[in-house]
Image (cartoon, rainbow, N blue to C red):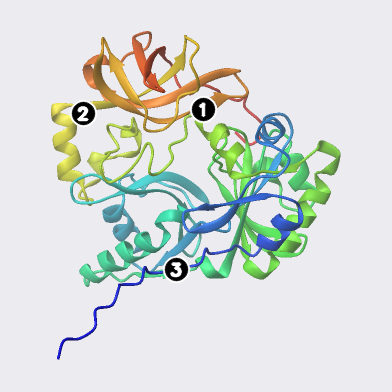
Amino acid sequence: MAQPQTTPQPQAEPPLKKTPLNAVHRNMGAKMVEFGGWDMPVRYSGDLEEHRAVRTAAGLFDLGHMGQVEVKGRDALPFIQWLVTNDFAPLPTDRAQYTLMCNLDGGVLDDLIIYRLPDRWFAVLNAANRESDVAWMRARRAERADLDVTVKDVSDDLGMLALQGPQAETILQRLTSANLAGVPSFSSTEATIEGVPTLIGRTGYTGEDGFELYFPIEQNETLWNKILEAGRPEGVQPIGLGARDTLRLEAKMALYGHELSEEINPLEAGLGWAVNFDKGEFIGRDALLKVKERKPARRLVGFQMVERGGAPRAGYEVQVDGERVGYVTSGTHAPTLNQSIGLALVRRDVAGVGKPLDIVIRGRPVRAEQVKTPFYKRRATSGE
Protein backbone atom coordinates (compact mmCIF):
# COMPACT_ATOMS: atom_id res chain seq x y z
CA MET A 1 0.00 0.00 0.00
CA ALA A 2 1.48 3.32 -1.08
CA GLN A 3 2.35 5.73 1.67
CA PRO A 4 0.84 9.23 1.40
CA GLN A 5 3.39 11.79 0.30
CA THR A 6 4.11 14.63 2.65
CA THR A 7 5.57 18.00 1.83
CA PRO A 8 8.75 18.65 3.79
CA GLN A 9 8.25 21.47 6.21
CA PRO A 10 10.83 24.26 6.16
CA GLN A 11 13.00 24.26 9.23
CA ALA A 12 12.40 27.21 11.50
CA GLU A 13 15.28 29.62 11.88
CA PRO A 14 16.83 29.41 15.34
CA PRO A 15 15.76 32.30 17.55
CA LEU A 16 18.15 35.23 17.68
CA LYS A 17 20.43 35.30 20.67
CA LYS A 18 20.20 38.30 22.98
CA THR A 19 22.75 40.06 25.14
CA PRO A 20 21.71 40.90 28.74
CA LEU A 21 21.16 44.50 27.58
CA ASN A 22 18.58 43.65 24.91
CA ALA A 23 15.63 45.09 26.82
CA VAL A 24 17.71 48.17 27.75
CA HIS A 25 18.42 48.88 24.08
CA ARG A 26 14.76 48.54 23.19
CA ASN A 27 13.71 50.82 26.03
CA MET A 28 16.20 53.40 24.74
CA GLY A 29 14.49 53.30 21.34
CA ALA A 30 17.26 51.51 19.46
CA LYS A 31 16.53 50.01 16.07
CA MET A 32 17.40 46.32 16.32
CA VAL A 33 18.77 44.07 13.56
CA GLU A 34 20.14 40.55 13.17
CA PHE A 35 23.94 40.40 13.32
CA GLY A 36 25.83 37.10 13.43
CA GLY A 37 22.78 35.36 14.90
CA TRP A 38 22.26 38.05 17.55
CA ASP A 39 19.57 40.69 18.03
CA MET A 40 21.69 43.84 18.19
CA PRO A 41 21.15 47.63 18.13
CA VAL A 42 22.10 49.16 14.77
CA ARG A 43 21.41 52.74 15.87
CA TYR A 44 19.92 54.86 18.66
CA SER A 45 19.89 58.57 17.74
CA GLY A 46 21.33 58.08 14.24
CA ASP A 47 24.50 56.82 12.58
CA LEU A 48 25.99 60.25 11.90
CA GLU A 49 25.41 61.62 15.40
CA GLU A 50 26.76 58.46 17.02
CA HIS A 51 29.82 58.43 14.76
CA ARG A 52 30.63 62.04 15.64
CA ALA A 53 30.14 61.37 19.36
CA VAL A 54 32.91 58.75 19.30
CA ARG A 55 35.26 60.97 17.28
CA THR A 56 34.72 64.05 19.49
CA ALA A 57 33.69 62.77 22.94
CA ALA A 58 32.93 59.12 23.72
CA GLY A 59 30.59 56.27 22.84
CA LEU A 60 29.51 53.17 24.74
CA PHE A 61 29.11 49.86 22.89
CA ASP A 62 27.40 46.64 23.97
CA LEU A 63 29.76 43.84 22.88
CA GLY A 64 27.99 41.09 24.77
CA HIS A 65 27.68 39.08 21.56
CA MET A 66 31.44 38.54 21.30
CA GLY A 67 33.17 35.45 22.63
CA GLN A 68 35.93 34.92 25.19
CA VAL A 69 38.12 31.89 25.81
CA GLU A 70 40.58 31.21 28.61
CA VAL A 71 43.66 29.09 27.91
CA LYS A 72 45.52 27.75 30.97
CA GLY A 73 48.14 25.19 31.87
CA ARG A 74 51.89 24.68 31.82
CA ASP A 75 51.92 24.45 28.02
CA ALA A 76 49.45 27.25 27.29
CA LEU A 77 52.08 29.32 25.50
CA PRO A 78 53.28 26.53 23.17
CA PHE A 79 49.65 25.78 22.34
CA ILE A 80 48.89 29.40 21.46
CA GLN A 81 52.12 29.67 19.45
CA TRP A 82 50.96 26.70 17.35
CA LEU A 83 47.33 27.85 17.12
CA VAL A 84 47.76 31.43 15.83
CA THR A 85 50.04 33.41 13.53
CA ASN A 86 51.66 36.05 15.75
CA ASP A 87 54.52 35.50 18.19
CA PHE A 88 53.38 35.59 21.83
CA ALA A 89 56.61 34.43 23.47
CA PRO A 90 58.02 37.96 23.94
CA LEU A 91 54.68 39.43 25.08
CA PRO A 92 54.92 40.76 28.67
CA THR A 93 52.27 40.00 31.27
CA ASP A 94 49.23 42.31 31.11
CA ARG A 95 49.78 43.08 27.43
CA ALA A 96 47.60 42.16 24.46
CA GLN A 97 48.32 41.41 20.82
CA TYR A 98 46.36 41.13 17.58
CA THR A 99 46.63 37.82 15.76
CA LEU A 100 44.94 35.51 13.27
CA MET A 101 43.76 31.93 13.51
CA CYS A 102 44.15 30.16 10.17
CA ASN A 103 43.27 26.83 8.63
CA LEU A 104 45.85 24.54 7.05
CA ASP A 105 45.48 26.36 3.71
CA GLY A 106 46.26 29.74 5.29
CA GLY A 107 42.69 31.02 5.10
CA VAL A 108 41.56 33.06 8.08
CA LEU A 109 39.16 31.41 10.52
CA ASP A 110 39.05 34.54 12.70
CA ASP A 111 41.08 37.50 13.89
CA LEU A 112 41.57 37.68 17.63
CA ILE A 113 43.00 39.80 20.41
CA ILE A 114 44.81 37.70 23.02
CA TYR A 115 45.84 39.00 26.45
CA ARG A 116 48.66 37.54 28.50
CA LEU A 117 47.43 37.70 32.10
CA PRO A 118 49.27 36.63 35.26
CA ASP A 119 47.43 33.31 35.56
CA ARG A 120 45.93 32.72 32.10
CA TRP A 121 45.71 33.68 28.45
CA PHE A 122 42.49 35.40 27.44
CA ALA A 123 41.31 35.37 23.81
CA VAL A 124 38.53 37.58 22.42
CA LEU A 125 36.57 36.14 19.47
CA ASN A 126 34.26 37.65 16.87
CA ALA A 127 30.57 37.07 17.50
CA ALA A 128 29.69 35.29 14.25
CA ASN A 129 32.62 32.87 14.70
CA ARG A 130 32.24 32.20 18.40
CA GLU A 131 30.95 28.61 18.21
CA SER A 132 33.19 27.60 15.29
CA ASP A 133 36.25 29.16 16.93
CA VAL A 134 35.67 27.31 20.20
CA ALA A 135 35.10 24.04 18.34
CA TRP A 136 38.30 24.55 16.32
CA MET A 137 40.34 25.35 19.43
CA ARG A 138 38.99 22.34 21.30
CA ALA A 139 39.64 20.05 18.33
CA ARG A 140 43.21 21.32 18.06
CA ARG A 141 43.61 20.82 21.81
CA ALA A 142 42.49 17.20 21.39
CA GLU A 143 45.22 16.70 18.76
CA ARG A 144 47.92 17.79 21.21
CA ALA A 145 47.89 15.16 23.92
CA ASP A 146 51.52 16.10 24.54
CA LEU A 147 50.54 19.49 25.95
CA ASP A 148 49.31 20.35 29.45
CA VAL A 149 46.66 22.91 28.49
CA THR A 150 42.95 23.57 28.98
CA VAL A 151 40.63 25.57 26.72
CA LYS A 152 37.54 27.02 28.40
CA ASP A 153 34.75 29.01 26.77
CA VAL A 154 33.80 31.70 29.30
CA SER A 155 31.57 33.73 26.96
CA ASP A 156 28.38 33.00 28.88
CA ASP A 157 29.96 34.11 32.16
CA LEU A 158 31.25 37.50 31.04
CA GLY A 159 29.71 40.77 29.96
CA MET A 160 31.65 42.97 27.55
CA LEU A 161 31.39 46.71 26.99
CA ALA A 162 33.59 49.14 25.08
CA LEU A 163 34.02 52.82 25.85
CA GLN A 164 35.70 54.60 22.93
CA GLY A 165 36.61 58.19 22.18
CA PRO A 166 38.97 61.00 23.23
CA GLN A 167 37.10 61.44 26.54
CA ALA A 168 36.98 57.72 27.38
CA GLU A 169 39.79 57.84 29.92
CA THR A 170 38.35 60.87 31.71
CA ILE A 171 34.93 59.24 32.00
CA LEU A 172 36.08 55.79 33.09
CA GLN A 173 38.58 57.21 35.60
CA ARG A 174 35.65 58.60 37.62
CA LEU A 175 34.50 55.04 38.28
CA THR A 176 37.75 53.28 39.20
CA SER A 177 40.79 53.75 41.43
CA ALA A 178 43.02 52.12 38.79
CA ASN A 179 45.48 54.56 37.20
CA LEU A 180 44.18 54.43 33.64
CA ALA A 181 46.79 56.90 32.40
CA GLY A 182 49.36 54.24 33.32
CA VAL A 183 47.73 51.59 31.11
CA PRO A 184 49.33 51.82 27.64
CA SER A 185 47.60 50.90 24.41
CA PHE A 186 47.16 47.12 24.05
CA SER A 187 47.69 46.64 27.78
CA SER A 188 45.33 45.62 30.56
CA THR A 189 44.75 45.86 34.28
CA GLU A 190 42.44 43.93 36.59
CA ALA A 191 40.61 46.33 38.87
CA THR A 192 37.11 47.26 40.01
CA ILE A 193 34.70 49.67 38.35
CA GLU A 194 32.10 50.85 40.84
CA GLY A 195 32.92 47.77 42.90
CA VAL A 196 32.58 45.35 39.95
CA PRO A 197 35.71 43.21 39.29
CA THR A 198 36.72 44.01 35.72
CA LEU A 199 39.47 43.23 33.26
CA ILE A 200 40.15 46.62 31.66
CA GLY A 201 41.85 46.38 28.27
CA ARG A 202 43.00 49.46 26.36
CA THR A 203 42.14 48.34 22.84
CA GLY A 204 39.38 49.16 20.40
CA TYR A 205 37.84 48.95 16.98
CA THR A 206 37.04 52.55 16.16
CA GLY A 207 40.36 54.26 15.53
CA GLU A 208 39.98 56.13 18.84
CA ASP A 209 41.54 55.65 22.25
CA GLY A 210 39.37 53.64 24.58
CA PHE A 211 38.76 50.60 26.71
CA GLU A 212 37.14 47.20 26.47
CA LEU A 213 35.71 45.87 29.73
CA TYR A 214 35.12 42.25 30.81
CA PHE A 215 33.18 41.55 34.01
CA PRO A 216 30.61 39.16 35.58
CA ILE A 217 27.70 39.04 33.17
CA GLU A 218 25.09 39.80 35.85
CA GLN A 219 26.66 43.25 36.30
CA ASN A 220 26.04 44.25 32.67
CA GLU A 221 23.16 46.66 33.16
CA THR A 222 24.74 48.19 36.26
CA LEU A 223 27.97 49.11 34.47
CA TRP A 224 26.14 50.27 31.33
CA ASN A 225 24.07 52.73 33.34
CA LYS A 226 26.98 53.86 35.53
CA ILE A 227 29.17 54.67 32.52
CA LEU A 228 26.41 56.56 30.71
CA GLU A 229 25.75 58.55 33.87
CA ALA A 230 29.44 59.29 34.46
CA GLY A 231 29.90 60.44 30.87
CA ARG A 232 26.90 62.73 30.68
CA PRO A 233 29.01 65.94 31.08
CA GLU A 234 31.12 64.96 28.05
CA GLY A 235 28.14 63.89 25.97
CA VAL A 236 28.75 60.12 25.93
CA GLN A 237 26.24 58.26 23.75
CA PRO A 238 25.27 54.61 23.23
CA ILE A 239 26.56 53.47 19.84
CA GLY A 240 25.02 50.97 17.42
CA LEU A 241 26.44 48.75 14.72
CA GLY A 242 25.91 51.36 12.00
CA ALA A 243 28.34 53.89 13.46
CA ARG A 244 30.68 51.11 14.59
CA ASP A 245 31.06 50.09 10.94
CA THR A 246 31.82 53.59 9.62
CA LEU A 247 34.25 54.19 12.49
CA ARG A 248 36.19 50.98 11.89
CA LEU A 249 36.31 51.50 8.12
CA GLU A 250 37.75 55.02 8.46
CA ALA A 251 40.46 53.45 10.64
CA LYS A 252 40.93 50.51 8.21
CA MET A 253 40.03 47.87 10.78
CA ALA A 254 39.28 44.52 9.13
CA LEU A 255 35.80 43.02 9.44
CA TYR A 256 35.58 39.25 9.31
CA GLY A 257 33.52 38.10 6.33
CA HIS A 258 34.59 41.20 4.39
CA GLU A 259 38.37 41.80 4.56
CA LEU A 260 39.04 38.39 6.12
CA SER A 261 37.66 34.91 5.46
CA GLU A 262 38.74 31.36 4.77
CA GLU A 263 39.12 32.46 1.13
CA ILE A 264 41.30 35.48 2.01
CA ASN A 265 44.70 34.95 3.60
CA PRO A 266 46.43 37.44 5.93
CA LEU A 267 49.07 38.42 3.35
CA GLU A 268 46.42 39.41 0.80
CA ALA A 269 44.64 41.39 3.51
CA GLY A 270 47.76 43.42 4.33
CA LEU A 271 48.16 41.76 7.72
CA GLY A 272 51.56 40.21 7.18
CA TRP A 273 52.77 42.14 10.25
CA ALA A 274 50.62 39.79 12.36
CA VAL A 275 52.23 36.66 10.86
CA ASN A 276 55.56 35.64 12.35
CA PHE A 277 57.33 32.97 10.30
CA ASP A 278 60.37 32.95 12.59
CA LYS A 279 58.64 31.67 15.73
CA GLY A 280 58.40 28.07 14.51
CA GLU A 281 55.50 25.92 13.39
CA PHE A 282 51.92 27.18 13.47
CA ILE A 283 48.77 26.09 11.71
CA GLY A 284 48.79 27.41 8.14
CA ARG A 285 52.49 28.34 8.16
CA ASP A 286 53.53 26.20 5.18
CA ALA A 287 50.70 27.50 3.00
CA LEU A 288 51.34 31.12 3.97
CA LEU A 289 55.08 30.77 3.39
CA LYS A 290 54.36 29.68 -0.19
CA VAL A 291 52.13 32.72 -0.67
CA LYS A 292 54.87 34.97 0.69
CA GLU A 293 57.52 33.47 -1.58
CA ARG A 294 55.49 33.87 -4.76
CA LYS A 295 53.82 37.09 -3.53
CA PRO A 296 50.05 37.33 -3.01
CA ALA A 297 48.01 37.38 -6.21
CA ARG A 298 45.64 39.95 -4.67
CA ARG A 299 46.04 42.99 -2.48
CA LEU A 300 43.66 44.85 -0.22
CA VAL A 301 43.69 48.54 -1.18
CA GLY A 302 41.98 51.67 0.05
CA PHE A 303 40.20 54.00 -2.36
CA GLN A 304 38.13 57.15 -2.42
CA MET A 305 35.54 58.08 -5.01
CA VAL A 306 36.56 60.93 -7.30
CA GLU A 307 33.40 60.90 -9.42
CA ARG A 308 29.82 61.26 -8.28
CA GLY A 309 27.61 58.24 -8.67
CA GLY A 310 26.78 56.84 -5.26
CA ALA A 311 28.55 55.23 -2.32
CA PRO A 312 30.54 52.00 -2.81
CA ARG A 313 29.20 48.90 -1.08
CA ALA A 314 30.57 45.46 -0.25
CA GLY A 315 30.46 43.11 -3.21
CA TYR A 316 30.52 45.78 -5.93
CA GLU A 317 32.71 44.87 -8.90
CA VAL A 318 36.00 46.72 -9.41
CA GLN A 319 37.26 47.31 -12.95
CA VAL A 320 40.29 48.76 -14.71
CA ASP A 321 39.82 49.65 -18.40
CA GLY A 322 36.55 47.72 -18.42
CA GLU A 323 38.12 44.52 -17.07
CA ARG A 324 37.11 43.02 -13.73
CA VAL A 325 40.09 43.12 -11.38
CA GLY A 326 38.46 42.53 -7.98
CA TYR A 327 35.63 43.57 -5.71
CA VAL A 328 34.79 45.96 -2.89
CA THR A 329 35.09 44.34 0.54
CA SER A 330 33.68 47.35 2.48
CA GLY A 331 32.46 50.77 1.43
CA THR A 332 30.59 53.73 2.87
CA HIS A 333 30.33 57.49 3.07
CA ALA A 334 32.87 58.46 5.73
CA PRO A 335 31.36 61.09 8.07
CA THR A 336 34.70 62.34 9.43
CA LEU A 337 36.13 62.83 5.93
CA ASN A 338 32.89 63.76 4.16
CA GLN A 339 34.07 61.44 1.41
CA SER A 340 32.92 58.11 -0.03
CA ILE A 341 35.62 55.52 0.69
CA GLY A 342 36.16 51.81 0.56
CA LEU A 343 38.46 48.82 0.68
CA ALA A 344 38.82 46.49 -2.30
CA LEU A 345 40.58 43.21 -2.93
CA VAL A 346 42.18 43.58 -6.36
CA ARG A 347 44.81 41.96 -8.58
CA ARG A 348 48.31 42.80 -7.44
CA ASP A 349 49.31 44.33 -10.77
CA VAL A 350 46.66 47.08 -10.56
CA ALA A 351 47.26 47.92 -6.89
CA GLY A 352 49.08 51.09 -5.88
CA VAL A 353 48.47 54.48 -4.27
CA GLY A 354 47.37 56.98 -6.90
CA LYS A 355 46.30 54.36 -9.43
CA PRO A 356 42.72 54.56 -10.79
CA LEU A 357 39.91 52.08 -10.24
CA ASP A 358 36.32 51.98 -11.47
CA ILE A 359 33.66 50.86 -8.99
CA VAL A 360 30.57 49.49 -10.71
CA ILE A 361 27.63 51.19 -9.01
CA ARG A 362 24.13 50.42 -10.30
CA GLY A 363 25.61 49.01 -13.49
CA ARG A 364 27.83 52.01 -14.26
CA PRO A 365 31.62 52.28 -13.69
CA VAL A 366 32.34 55.22 -11.39
CA ARG A 367 35.90 56.52 -11.08
CA ALA A 368 37.87 56.07 -7.84
CA GLU A 369 41.50 56.54 -6.86
CA GLN A 370 43.64 54.41 -4.57
CA VAL A 371 44.82 56.25 -1.44
CA LYS A 372 46.98 55.66 1.61
CA THR A 373 45.35 54.00 4.58
CA PRO A 374 44.16 54.29 7.27
CA PHE A 375 41.79 56.94 5.97
CA TYR A 376 41.64 58.46 9.48
CA LYS A 377 44.24 58.48 12.25
CA ARG A 378 43.74 59.98 15.69
CA ARG A 379 46.18 62.02 17.70
CA ALA A 380 48.04 60.15 20.47
CA THR A 381 46.72 60.31 24.04
CA SER A 382 48.17 59.72 27.50
CA GLY A 383 47.70 55.98 27.25
CA GLU A 384 49.99 55.61 24.24
Q: Amino acid at mark 2?
A: Pro
Q: Label 3: how many residues lie within 10 Å, few (<14), some (14-19) or many (20+)? A: some
Q: Position of residue 2 (x, y in %)?
A: 16, 86
Above or below, 234 against 104 in this view is: above
Instruction: Name the N-terminal-most of marks 2 and 3.
Output: 3
**Residue shown at the point (23%, 40%) measured from the top left:** 278
Q: Label 2: how many residues lie within 10 Å, few (<14), some (14-19) or many (20+)? A: some
The tag on residue 153 is: 3
Instruction: Name the N-terminal-most of marks 2 and 1.
Output: 2
Q: Nearer the viewer, mark 2 or mark 1?
A: 1
The tag on residue 296 is: 2
Question: Residue tagged by mark 1?
Answer: 332
**Residue shown at the point (30%, 73%) measured from the top left:** 7
Q: Amino acid at mark 1?
A: Thr
Horizontal placement of 69 versus 22: left or right?
left
Instruction: Name the N-terminal-most of marks 3 and 1.
Output: 3
Secondary element at tag 2: loop
